[in-house]
């Protein structure tokens, strides 16, 4: 197949993703990867579509996605997108299996993506992983240290995100919706609810073709995780810093 055929497969897959048709997206990205096996974008999107598809089971889909992303060598990669997807795979594995190694790997990937690239998605999830790790600790002092560290990351993240929104070209950014989503959830996590609702309002003003159903579902899922933590005793240290 030609490069033009790859382009057609990618267009078809991206349309399927926007329509939450993950099965077709998996099939198209799979065919595209067979043709261009060294294309990082195709591999990343193939892995993403695979775990979003949740077939034959969510756990099996995550294991398959973990296999798909391996050629990009996430263990040593500095590519923020690769690290973000690898982190998501292991975080979701942990949410199913409660295997501590998966949470540790997710935290490591997100940490590298945030510290090396200042990637806001990685920063948001690095902080969340610290909170999740704190929630499983019996040592109160360790809980406090992890939650304080997560708070500090979120404070730094707000500054990074404000810098992005203040740029003259912000309205034209293709990731504007994710900047707004991260701002909203970061403010919620810091206990600054009014500011979180402010940015969430802008987020939900985005048109459906810009902010698709699966993306809305992803945002709501991340928010739900935060709300569960906020309503637990394990984030007490975070809010004592207000």
Image (cartoon, helix red, strand yellow):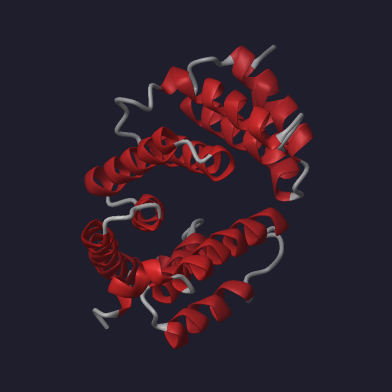
Q: Residue at x 49, y 74 (%)?
A: 231
Q: Residue at x 66, y 41 (%)?
A: 52
Q: Quadrant of residue 140?
A: bottom left
Left or right of 188? Residue 207 is right
- Work out whether 51 lies above or below 152: above
Regarding residue 211, the answer to whether it shows in the image is no
x and y percent of residue 30 in the render? 67, 21
x and y percent of residue 62 in the render? 60, 32
Name the one closer to the observer, 44 or 230.
230
- Work out whether 67 lies above or below 22: above
- Work out whether 61 lies above or below 183: above
Q: Residue at x 46, y 20 (%)?
A: 70
Quadrant containing the N terminus in the rendered view: top right
x and y percent of residue 179 in the render? 44, 64
Q: Residue at x 52, y 67 (%)?
A: 228
x and y percent of residue 14 in the render? 67, 41
Quadrant containing the C terminus in the rendered view: bottom left
Q: Quadrant of residue 189?
A: bottom left
């Amino acid at each position: 197949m030609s490069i033009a055929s790859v382009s057609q497969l990618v267009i078809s897959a991206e349309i399927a993703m926007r329509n939450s048709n993950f099965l077709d997206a998996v099939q198209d990205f799979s065919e595209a990867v067979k043709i261009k096996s060294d294309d990082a974008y195709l591999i990343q999107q193939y892995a993403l579509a695979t775990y979003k598809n949740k077939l034959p089971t969510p756990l099996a889909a995550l294991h398959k996605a973990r296999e798909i992303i391996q050629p990009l060598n996430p263990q040593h990669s500095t590519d923020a997108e690769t690290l973000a997807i690898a982190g998501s795979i292991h975080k979701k594995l942990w949410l199913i299996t409660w295997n501590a190694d998966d949470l540790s790997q997710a935290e490591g990937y997100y940490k590298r993506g945030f510290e090396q690239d200042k990637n806001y998605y990685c920063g948001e999830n690095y902080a969340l992983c610290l909170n999740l790790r704190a929630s499983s600790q019996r040592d109160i002092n360790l809980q406090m240290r992890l939650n304080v560290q997560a708070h500090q990351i979120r404070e730094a993240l707000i500054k990074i995100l404000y810098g992005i929104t203040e740029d003259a070209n912000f309205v034209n950014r293709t990731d504007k919706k994710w900047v707004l989503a991260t701002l909203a959830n970061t403010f919620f996590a810091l206990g600054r609810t009014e500011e979180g609702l402010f940015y969430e309002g802008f987020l939900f003003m985005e048109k459906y073709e810009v902010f698709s159903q699966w993306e809305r579902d992803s945002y709501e899922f991340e928010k739900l995780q935060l709300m569960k933590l906020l309503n637990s005793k394990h984030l007490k240290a975070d809010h004592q810093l207000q």
